[in-house]
Image (spheres, grey):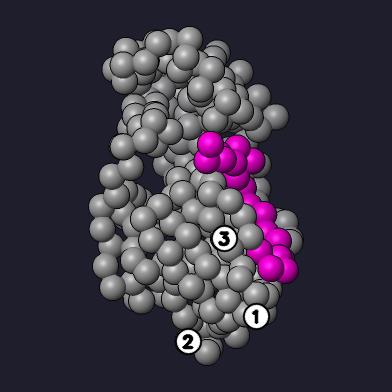
Amino acid sequence: MIQYQESNSQGNFNYNAYYYDNISFPYHFHKNMELLHVLEGEVELRLESRAETIVAGQYALIFSNQIHAYHTGKASKSWVGVFSQDHVAGFSAQTEGLEGNPSGFLCPDPLQAYLLETLPLSFQEQGLPALYRRKSCLYAVCSQYLSCAPQLYAVNRGHDLPHRLLEIIAAEFTGDLTLAQLADRLGYDYHYLSRFFHQLFHTNFRTFLNQYRFDYAVYLLTHTELSITEIALKSGFQSLRSFNRVFRDFSSMSPQEYAAYRYRL
């Protein structure tokens, strides 16, 4: 089964990065975006319907829930950063449901020098200055990607069950969505779908759904002037009590504490 990476599917400005020698990784996907930078040698980037060779100096941008794998034939050294979509919220919103072809691209020398100096460090540091440096680097990368990608095309991943589940959840998480409804709509036995969901996503349906709602609530808290009650209802929660409980489960803060924390940053 293709691996779903739960740890790389969290919002709230989640990020991580690692250096790899001779990177090879089986097919997997996650909600967060991913950036590959090949420093030496070459890496084969395998996507659902095509493969690309990313050579030294090139970057490759992986979109949310895009199935991908890496393979090194001879030798390579790479840097891989995974980041939640709220780092590049504008780009993410404008390219939702789209992908580019090819995924690999080069950056001009001045941008390349800035990224080499700033991007890896911004993934190691915490605090507001590092967040702004990280966002500036990632927006610069996204801008260059759009400049180099010859075309952006609509993606239809509805042919496989994992992506059919994700598409429905992403479109309807603010409503009264249940696993029983999904089983009925998709034509699966409820107990089978429940086992499949847990095996694939390593959590139950309710927790997974609340992660989507929490991430959206965080976006509304940081990008709008809506009240806490309005945010709770717009995010799909039926009561302020359940909203507060779920919010604290995911962030260890109340919505009010989180808003004050983000303001202080």
**Residue closer to the observer: 18 or 3:** 3
Tag 3 or tag 1, which sits nearer the N-term?
1
Is 10 within the magenta?
Answer: yes
Residue 108 numbered mark, or none = 2
Tag 2 or tag 1, which sits nearer the N-term?
1
Crowd band around label 2 with a 10 angstrom C-alpha radius: few (<14), some (14–19), many (20+): few
Q: Quadrant of residue 12?
A: top right
Query: Horizontally, is 33 left or right of 153 in the view?
Result: right
Alpha carbon of mark 1 to alpha carbon of mark 2: how far?
A: 18 Å
Q: Residue at x 52, y 40 (%)?
A: 2
Question: In terms of secondary structure, where does tag 1 sit?
Answer: strand
Crowd band around label 3 with a 10 angstrom C-alpha radius: few (<14), some (14–19), many (20+): many
Q: Which amino acid type is marked by label 1?
A: Glu
What residue would you read off at disc 1? 40
**Residue closer to the observer: 124 or 60:** 60
Write down the region rendered in magenta: 1-23
Tag 3 or tag 2, which sits nearer the N-term?
3
Q: Residue at x 34, y 66 (%)?
A: 101
Q: Residue furthest front?
A: 73
Query: Horizontally, is 196 left or right of 95 in the view?
Result: right
What residue would you read off at disc 3? 70
Alpha carbon of mark 2 to alpha carbon of mark 3: how far?
A: 25 Å
Alpha carbon of mark 1 to alpha carbon of mark 3: how far?
A: 15 Å
